[in-house]
Image (tube, rainbow, N blue to C red):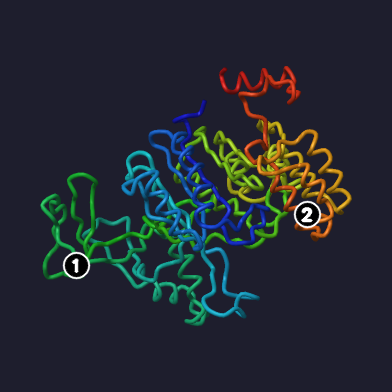
């Protein structure tokens, strides 16, 4: 149904680190983990549009493995520079651990179409650059009459009672308010064949500014053979604030992971990604009304941000996080959630979403086993499994029951693990092809929904 329709895929899969906050089986061996990822990435490629882009978030544990896997699936020539994201600072408990302190994660990017247009130019806030140290005194005069002064001297003259070491904030504010006449120089620079001299100044006045006309985009200015760059070219509106900026690079150190636990009204201690991270990814790789997909949805950050930014979205998640579930979060978004990026995008609430749950078979028993509190409960679940579950062909039920005392000798965690292992994992959910089988008791309305969804 959605083959070739998805503009952007972002996933944050299990890191395979033996400790994941989203309750994943996060300790696969490499081959199992890669098979797990390969199947999903191969399907993802089919869903991407001809100009679609996929972002895969990982840490250093499996970075090399998944890079090779994605090279194979999408092609080495489809890889864009991967992003390194600073996620924390070397403080607190981390500093007591030996060796290097890990403060970064990685995002691999692959595109289906033209690499040059896959990611839009973007800008981030930057500090004042001291290179912009000159001010034109009389910008309304002809260029040949322009004079200029050092910005520090000018601000000091205008604020004679301020100590020199305290002038910097005033200099930065002055540059922001007078960006059309504050400038820096770069060079040396000589007019090329594409330029023609627009204003000639006497060689006896080498400190004067010279205007040089480009054939295609107006005047450029030279000072002592160096190109003049006005501060206003550095200013753009970021998150509603006009500020100095720089081009977005492949190292993102400006996105804070602090205070995001309650974003969206769902609480998770670890593993959650900031809404600002998803906002940036969605901004540079999609347009309003594009379709965004996340098939490791977790607490729902991707869908929540897509909703606030006017994108269509699909989220897929196998686990139920209760009060921290993505459905809870999206309801909060519709009701006017004020956290995360809401202020930056002027989010006031509204919209709607539709969600469906996959009909469970063996997954029902896995849920019960995980929620059980005692061995007695597990034995009750085992009785029900014998009647209704799809069990592994390797299990001899009669032999198991005859040796139930061996099961009783196991500790509780091993008992849980054993019962989950004997379930056929290929039958966790009702197969679409089997929904008419009476054993699954699929309602007529659910059958109609599936036929409509899959265009059967």
Across and down, in percent, residue 390 comes to: 71, 36
Quadrant placement of the C terminus: top right
**Residue 352 visible within the image:** no
- Foreground residue among 64 and 253: 64
Give the camera-side residue of 296 and 314: 296
Query: Of helix, strand and loop, which one carries label 1?
Result: loop
Q: Which residue is mark 1?
A: 188
Q: Residues within 10 Å of mark 1 (few under 14, many from 20)?
A: few
Identify the element where label 2 is drawn.
Answer: helix
Cα–Cα span, label 2 and label 1: 76 Å
Q: Residues within 10 Å of mark 2 (few under 14, many from 20)?
A: some
Q: Residue furthest right?
A: 376
Residue at x 82% of width, y 60% of height: 409
Look at 51% across and 82% down and name the residue there: 163
Whichever of callouts 2 and 1 sits on the residue coming sooner in the sequence is 1
Q: Residue at x 65, y 24 (%)?
A: 434
Residue 191 place in picture, x, y as percent: 14, 57
Q: Residue at x 57, y 74 (%)?
A: 90
Question: Could you say which is closer to the camera, residue 327 or residue 184?
Answer: 327
Residue 382, compared with residue 200, is above or below; it is above
Q: Nearer the viewer, mark 2 or mark 1?
A: 2
Tell me where residue 145 sits by quadrant: bottom left
Asked if residue 299 is positioned above or below residue 444 in the image, the reply reads below
Q: Position of residue 441 (x, y in %)?
A: 76, 23
Disc ID at residue 415: 2
Q: Is residue 418 left or right of residue 205?
A: right
Q: Position of residue 109 (x, y in %)?
A: 42, 49
């Amino acid at each position: 149904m959605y083959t070739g329709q998805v503009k952007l895929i972002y996933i944050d899969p299990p890191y395979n680190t033996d400790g994941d906050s989203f309750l994943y089986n996060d300790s696969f061996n490499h081959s199992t983990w890669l098979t797990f990822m390969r199947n999903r990435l191969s399907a993802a490629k089919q869903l991407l549009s001809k100009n679609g882009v996929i972002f895969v978030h990982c840490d250093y544990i499996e970075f090399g493995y998944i890079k090779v896997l994605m090279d194979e699936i999408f092609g080495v020539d489809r890889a864009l520079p991967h992003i390194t994201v600073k996620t924390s600072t070397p403080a607190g408990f981390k500093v007591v651990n030996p060796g290097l302190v890990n403060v970064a994660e990685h995002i691999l990017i692959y595109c289906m179409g033209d690499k040059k247009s896959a990611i839009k130019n973007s800008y981030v806030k930057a500090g004042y650059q001291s290179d912009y140290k000159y001010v034109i005194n009389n910008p309304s005069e002809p260029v040949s009459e322009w004079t200029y002064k050092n910005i520090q001297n000018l601000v000091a003259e205008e604020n004679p009672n301020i100590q020199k070491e305290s002038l910097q904030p005033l200099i930065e504010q002055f540059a922001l308010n007078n960006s059309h006449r504050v400038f820096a120089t770069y060079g040396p620079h000589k007019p090329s064949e594409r330029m023609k001299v627009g204003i000639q100044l006497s060689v006896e006045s080498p400190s004067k500014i010279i205007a040089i006309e480009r054939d295609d985009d107006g005047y450029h200015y030279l000072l002592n053979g160096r190109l003049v760059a006005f501060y206003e070219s550095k200013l753009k509106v970021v998150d509603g604030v006009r500020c100095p900026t720089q081009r977005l690079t492949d190292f993102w150190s400006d996105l804070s992971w602090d205070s995001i636990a309650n974003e969206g009204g769902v609480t998770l201690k670890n593993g959650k990604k900031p809404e600002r991270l998803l906002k940036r990814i969605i901004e540079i790789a999609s347009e309003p009304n594009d379709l965004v997909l996340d098939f490791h949805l977790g607490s729902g950050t991707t869908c929540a941000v897509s909703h606030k930014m006017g994108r269509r979205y699909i989220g897929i998640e196998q686990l139920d996080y209760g009060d921290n579930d993505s459905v809870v979060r999206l309801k909060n978004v519709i009701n006017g959630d004020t956290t995360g990026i809401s202020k930056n995008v002027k989010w006031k609430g509204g919209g709607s979403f539709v969600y469906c749950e996959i009909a469970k078979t063996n997954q029902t028993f896995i849920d019960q086993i995980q929620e059980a509190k005692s061995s007695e409960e597990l034995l009750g679940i085992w009785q029900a499994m014998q009647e209704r579950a799809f069990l592994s062909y390797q299990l001899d039920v009669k032999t198991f029951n005859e040796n139930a005392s061996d099961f009783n000798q196991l500790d509780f965690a091993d008992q849980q693990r054993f019962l989950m292992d004997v379930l056929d994992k290929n039958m966790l959910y009702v197969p679409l092809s089997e929904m008419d089988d009476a054993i699954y008791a699929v309602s007529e309305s659910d059958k109609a929904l599936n036929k409509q969804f899959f265009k059967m």
